[in-house]
Image (spheres, rainbow, N blue to C red):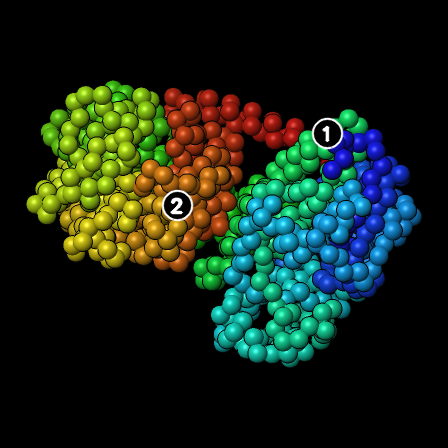
């Protein structure tokens, strides 16, 4: 390869005459007309597959900045629309302000091909290209812009670190002369299952019409056995009421059998270049069609690659590293959103029992790119109507207020709002006694407005502690200490308080958190027991497998702690069966290696935790609720607990009397590789709630009211727990109430003046922001 990125004219072959290849060619010639750029396309000119493509305003700005000539032509021909229609159960939910723009793929390619020719790019159609780089020895660069099924990428896959995942659903990309005045999602129930369409206008006389369904529905309807004309005719019948007598059309009728139906291939490449070969667009990465960003990514890739290759004095290797580093960040963001969107459509049956308003909200927020407050900016009236409906379902009365402030009932306990102070280990007890620190810590957060406050994991025996600083509930001194705190919470706030009980198992006898998590004590260690003799890590002591006699003893300790909780006045009890502690160690096969009736199958692994919970439930008053915290994913694939198993775990505890499943994940084995990100555990709450039809609490990197409102309104959880945000802001909920100007949130009387002032400040900030947006 030539050593410098800029300053030399290059002979470049672009493989693929789609948007990526053509726009890269344009971008290179704009920066240096001396470049010799050729585009090779295997199809005839004017032959393309797919119908319309969708753009964002930001993409249009990028096109105008890069090439105003083609950018203006494209912009002038865009179809514009603002509305989204969601058709479900015979109802249509319309929301506005979404600002879509689209253009026909064929017309886009005509514009780009014309502009490329103007700039001196040589276009070659009906040309098959040899992916062997030896065939391109006379060329400086070969740009593989040959799409999702790139032959060049596959021929050199070992150099690119290719990861291809075939998604579950089937889809077919069709068109229709029916022009939709809104981006339309239409869901129809058939005898074989649900099928749906994504439809949008891209020209005055034509719309894209993508039909999607599960593999089971696809086979059940017989699409796998139909020729294309028959399959299209059935789609016309299924969606007749949306087509107004217009036909569905395919521009791939030369394909036979079921080949017109595809499964989406998500592609990730660790490296985007090898020798003189560079991947561009779908050849390097793909984003699911349900977020409409594939062409956007391709065009923006082309701009960046042309920019770095023409920068004077920049080494070629450095230039390509910058190309991938910058573009890969944007790609990862979109691929994460696309994954969320893809999974929503693959699991849509979870939500089909939702009322139309909530189904539509869930669909609109599926990718996490559109938030609750973003929807307010787009369509304030629609969102306020949605909020009123949420409140009516929660209370029987309509109210235009944030969903997070709606009350929630578990048995006879009603919490004033849906915000929970999550259990957080404080490591500040002395001999298990919760002291002044705990009084101030929990009391302040109760006064801060949360509806429900959890204690940290409170251990049922000295040997069941994680660290010497862990709180306990095993003697009268503990009852008195906790009663002092519970009484303060009840006397000085409207919060309810929950006692979380647990036993450390193999993770016991370690140092307090700030001295190192899961690090054994330097001296004074006590023996630990667990489901099996599996050490938490090589540094931790090997536990003794718990015997049946010891299991009875530990169960009795849990029951005794529950009875002490009654004496202390707690409103609720939670059993900690997550994060690799004793009961979690029974549930996960990564720790449980037993060969008796408590090991092996999930039913056996759940046997002892369910015994403990049932005994606790019997000792706890029937009118007060109980919850269970579980790890819904061991982050170990099929070797550990999977999200599918988590649904069964939640169901088992619910059948034993649990009123709420507190859905966490991981921390069940030392070598876990969790996939972190905002709201990263919320999908597990969503799955358990809407597949098992159980009340759930979401937790895990939830930080702001916008996220909490979206989780609740979309039906992904019933309560939202926040840990770290409450560590730095005990008044998190009061601050949110001031931000929303929500007057019905209970405020400690001494704080009322500050609350009113804070509300005025937020109101002024909102007015200033609105004025800026208007300007």
Which of pointers 2 and 1 indicates the residue nearer the eye?
Answer: 1
Q: Which residue is mark 2?
A: 635
Local crowd at mark 2 within 10 Å, few (<14), some, or many (≥20)? Answer: many
Q: Marks 2/1: CA distance?
A: 40 Å
Residue beneath the point at 40% across and 35% down: 722
Q: Earlier in the sequence, mark 2 or mark 1?
A: 1
Q: Name the image quarter holding residue 746.
A: top left
Disc 1 packing (10 Å; few <14; some 14–19; many ≥20): some
Number of numbered discs: 2
Residue 589 % position (x, y): 28, 49
- Relative to 217, say whether 687 is above or below: above
The residue closer to the viewer here, 86 or 196, is 196
The N terminus lies in quadrant = top right
Asked which quadrant contains residue 509, the reply is top left
Secondary structure under tag 2 reads: loop
Q: Which residue is mark 1?
A: 315
- The residue sitting at 65% across, 38% down in the picture is 324
Left or right position of 635 against 254: left
Q: Residue furthest left?
A: 549
Residue 53, how many percent across, how many down? 72, 55
Residue at 25% x, 20% y: name it.
436
Q: Is residue 500 visible in this depiction of the protein?
A: no
Q: Quadrant of the C terminus?
A: top right
Location of residue 317 with respect to 650 vertically, above or below: above
Residue 432 sits in quarter: top left
> In x, y percent, where is residue 652?
27, 56
Res 557 seen here: yes
Name which residue lies at 21% across and 56% down. Answer: 604
SS state under label 1: loop
Q: Is residue 503 left or right of residue 265?
A: left
């Amino acid at each position: 390869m030539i050593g410098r990125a800029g300053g030399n004219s290059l002979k470049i072959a672009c493989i693929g005459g789609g948007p990526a290849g053509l726009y890269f060619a344009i971008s290179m010639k704009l920066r240096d007309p001396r470049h010799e750029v050729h585009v090779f396309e295997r199809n005839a000119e004017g032959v393309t597959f797919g119908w319309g493509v969708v753009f964002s305003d930001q993409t249009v700005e990028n096109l105008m900045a890069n090439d105003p000539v083609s950018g203006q032509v494209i912009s002038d021909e865009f179809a514009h629309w603002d509305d989204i229609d969601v058709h479900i159960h015979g109802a249509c939910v319309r929301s506005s302000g979404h600002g879509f723009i689209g253009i026909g793929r064929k017309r886009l390619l005509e514009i780009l091909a014309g502009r490329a020719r103007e700039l001196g790019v040589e276009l070659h159609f009906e040309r098959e290209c040899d992916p062997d780089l030896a065939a391109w020895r006379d060329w400086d660069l070969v740009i593989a812009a040959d799409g999702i099924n790139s032959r060049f990428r596959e021929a050199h896959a070992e150099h690119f670190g290719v990861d291809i995942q075939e998604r579950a659903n089937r889809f077919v990309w069709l068109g229709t002369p029916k022009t939709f005045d809104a981006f339309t999602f239409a869901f129809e129930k058939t005898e074989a299952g649900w099928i749906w369409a994504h439809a949008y206008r891209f020209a005055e006389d034509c719309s894209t019409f993508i039909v999607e369904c599960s593999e089971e529905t696809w086979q059940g309807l017989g699409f796998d056995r139909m020729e294309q004309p028959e399959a299209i005719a059935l789609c016309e019948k299924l969606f007749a009421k949306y087509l107004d007598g217009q036909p569905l059309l395919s521009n791939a009728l030369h394909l036979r059998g079921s080949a017109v139906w595809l499964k989406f291939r998500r592609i990730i490449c660790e490296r985007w270049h090898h020798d003189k070969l560079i991947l561009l667009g779908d050849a390097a990465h793909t984003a699911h069609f349900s977020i409409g960003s594939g062409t956007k990514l391709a065009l923006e890739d082309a701009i960046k690659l042309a920019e770095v290759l023409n920068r004077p004095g920049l080494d070629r290797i450095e230039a390509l590293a910058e190309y991938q580093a910058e573009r890969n960040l944007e790609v990862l963001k979109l691929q994460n959103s696309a994954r969320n969107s893809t999974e929503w459509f693959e699991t849509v049956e979870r939500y089909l029992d939702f009322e139309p308003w909530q189904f539509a909200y869930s669909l609109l927020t599926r990718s996490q790119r559109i938030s609750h407050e973003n929807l307010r900016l787009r369509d304030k009236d629609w969102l306020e109507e949605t909020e009123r409906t949420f409140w009516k379902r929660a209370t029987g009365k309509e109210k235009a207020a944030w969903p997070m402030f709606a009350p929630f009932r578990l048995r006879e306990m009603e919490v004033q709002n849906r915000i929970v102070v999550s259990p957080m280990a404080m490591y500040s007890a002395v001999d298990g006694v919760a002291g002044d620190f705990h009084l101030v810590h929990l009391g302040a957060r109760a006064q801060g407005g949360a509806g429900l406050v959890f204690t940290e994991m409170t251990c049922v025996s000295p040997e069941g502690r994680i660290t010497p600083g862990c709180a306990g509930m095993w003697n009268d001194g503990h009852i008195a200490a906790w009663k002092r705190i519970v009484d303060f919470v009840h006397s000085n706030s409207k919060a309810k308080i929950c006692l979380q009980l647990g036993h450390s198992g193999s993770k016991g006898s370690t140092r307090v958190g700030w001295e190192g998590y899961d690090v054994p004590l330097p001296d004074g260690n006590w023996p630990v027991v667990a489901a099996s003799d599996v050490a938490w890590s090589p540094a931790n002591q090997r536990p003794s497998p718990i015997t049946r006699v010891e299991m009875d003893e530990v169960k009795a300790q849990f029951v005794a702690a529950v009875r002490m909780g009654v004496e202390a006045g707690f409103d609720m009890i939670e059993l900690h069966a997550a994060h690799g502690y004793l009961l979690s160690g029974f549930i996960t096969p990564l720790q449980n290696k037993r060969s008796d009736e408590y090991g092996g199958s999930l039913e056996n692994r759940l046997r002892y935790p369910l015994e403990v919970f049932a005994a606790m439930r019997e000792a706890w008053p029937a009118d007060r609720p109980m919850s269970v915290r579980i790890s819904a994913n061991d982050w170990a694939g099929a070797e550990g607990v999977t999200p599918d198993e988590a649904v069964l775990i939640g169901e088992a505890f619910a059948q034993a009397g649990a009123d709420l499943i507190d859905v966490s994940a991981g921390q069940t084995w030392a070598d876990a590789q969790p996939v972190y990100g905002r709201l990263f555990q919320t999908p597990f709450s969503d799955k358990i709630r809407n597949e098992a039809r159980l009340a759930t609490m979401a937790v895990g990197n939830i930080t702001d009211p916008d996220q909490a409102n979206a989780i609740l309104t979309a039906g992904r959880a019933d309560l939202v727990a926040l840990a770290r945000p409450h560590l730095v802001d005990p008044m998190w909920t009061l601050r949110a109430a001031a931000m929303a100007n929500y007057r019905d949130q209970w405020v400690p009387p001494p704080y009322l003046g500050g609350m009113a002032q804070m509300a005025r400040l937020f109101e002024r900030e909102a007015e200033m922001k609105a004025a800026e947006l208007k300007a």
